[in-house]
Amino acid sequence: PHSTLHTSHPQQIYIPPQQSPLSNLLSHIQSRLQSSVAESMGFFKWVSLIFTICMFISKPTFSNSFLVKERLSEIPVNFLNLAKKPELVDWMVGIRRTIHENPELGFEEFETSKLIRTELQKMGIPYNYPVSVTGVVGFIGTGKPPFVAIRADMDALPMQEDVEWEHKSKIPGKMHACGHDAHVAMLLGAAKMLQEHHNDLQGTVVLVFQPAEEKGGGAKKMLETGVLENIDAIFGLHVSANFPIGAVATRAGPLLAGSGFFEAVISGKGGHAALPQHTIDPILAASNVIVSLQHLVSREADPLDSQVVTVAKFQGGGAFNVIPDSVTIGGTFRAFSKESFMQLKQRIKEVITGQAAVQRCNATVNFNTKDKPPYPVTVNNKDLHEHFRDVATDMLGAKNIIEMQPLMGAEDFSFFAEVIPGYFFFLGMQNETEERLEPMHSPYFIVNEDVLPYGAALHASLATKYLLEYQPKATSPKGSSHDEL
């Protein structure tokens, strides 16, 4: 009800079937829940009710659980041992390869989403779908605070895969060249482990399967639906060939730059190249614009405040002897603070229009914020940084936690981290005894599938330890100011 993306896709709530005398009651609640979405009722309060009933009618389990405060330091290692079991590894590898063979672009991940929902149903995990066209949000635990989210992106890239192997992309011109297929497999692996211990969770883990990370701002669209309103913290990861397998890299504070795009049309007057005096040359004007844009970083920005302006697109003319009527240029700009980012945006427009005017041309500048919304700076919460270090140290050892420098790359996880305490990290997958892996967005990009257990275990450990360590404070009898999910 909060997003125009839902006008043709009414939300559906999947509730696992229960073998119990209360099955009819569950069916009735599911029916009311379906209609309540359309009536803009409190979705999260309904989910809490579902969780309560499911827990009431589920069979009790008696196990020596390791998900207790007294055994906090054991949780990460235990999850890693579970994740490395051959049956779970083989299952995650199969999921990843199926998705890799069938890549889908942003907001087109229908088959990927269907696979995710099928697996969640097999596990008995309730979920909400569609969230922002193809997104899926699952729930494991009590349905009550605290609420911690773990996220995976789902979309592929519009490029041809050049890796020749058994599970090469079957879709011409589309490829999982950024590891999102592995991200989905790891989050599903974490879900499987968490669901096996759902009776021991001290709160609710929210599984976020996000569309359109590469372009379109899928995270922003998911936030606009309101489905993540009551989340207390969110964690995300990205595989990386820059770090060894079994290691993680991250930092507190700014990790990835804010990013925006611009396109400008510089219009003059075309004519014969032998008679330039009768023309107003937009190619000359565009050339001056490009040189002047570089001065924004070299002469206006603080050298200690990293910024980038890159013109990567230049289209104009089609003949050697004809000056065109117009030229189109485009590029990206990046910065590590909101203030620097907005200053760059303002100056890019001023420089383009001003330099075009000097050459007697007109210029229109479009930042295309609707189709390509600017990404905020990805900032890691400092408290969650300490939480992450504790978990990663217990699982991997302190020597395998790499304090990295900020990168000028961008991630739309930043939309989540802008409104929810968030934490993002890189998961190493380079086997240093083997050939060097190609970087992300390369047609030769390969995922070292040995990384899958580490990602699944980190997801599960970060979530469960958070629930144990960040229990909500007692509230007055009048009620809680924090609505249930």
Image (spheres, rainbow, N blue to C red):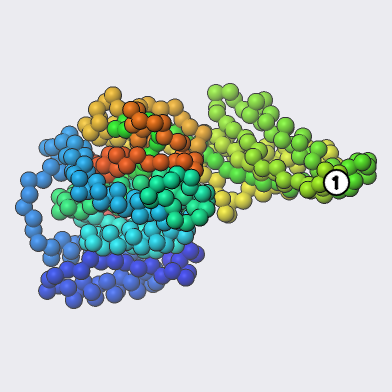
Q: Residue at x 22, y 59 (%)?
A: 123
**Residue occupying the point 48% across, 64% down:** 5
Asked whether the viewer can see residue 449, the reply is yes
**Quadrant containing the N terminus in the rendered view:** bottom left
Residue for point 84% across, 39% down:
359
State the SS at label 1: strand
Front-most of 87 and 289? 87
Q: Is 289 drawn above or below residue 172 in the view shown?
A: above
Location of the C terminus by quadrant is: bottom left
Quarter occupied by residue 70: top left
Left or right: residue 439 versus residue 476 is: right
Q: Is 267 displayed left or right of 311 in the figure?
A: right
Instruction: Residue type at mark 1: give it.
Output: Val
Mark 1 neighbour density, 10 Å: few (under 14) some (14–19) many (20 or more): some
Q: Mark 1 points at which residue?
A: 322
Camera-side residue of 253 and 95:
95
Based on the displayed image, in which of its 4 quarters is residue 39 positioned?
Answer: bottom left
Q: Residue at coordinates 31% horizontally, 53% vertically from top-left?
A: 95
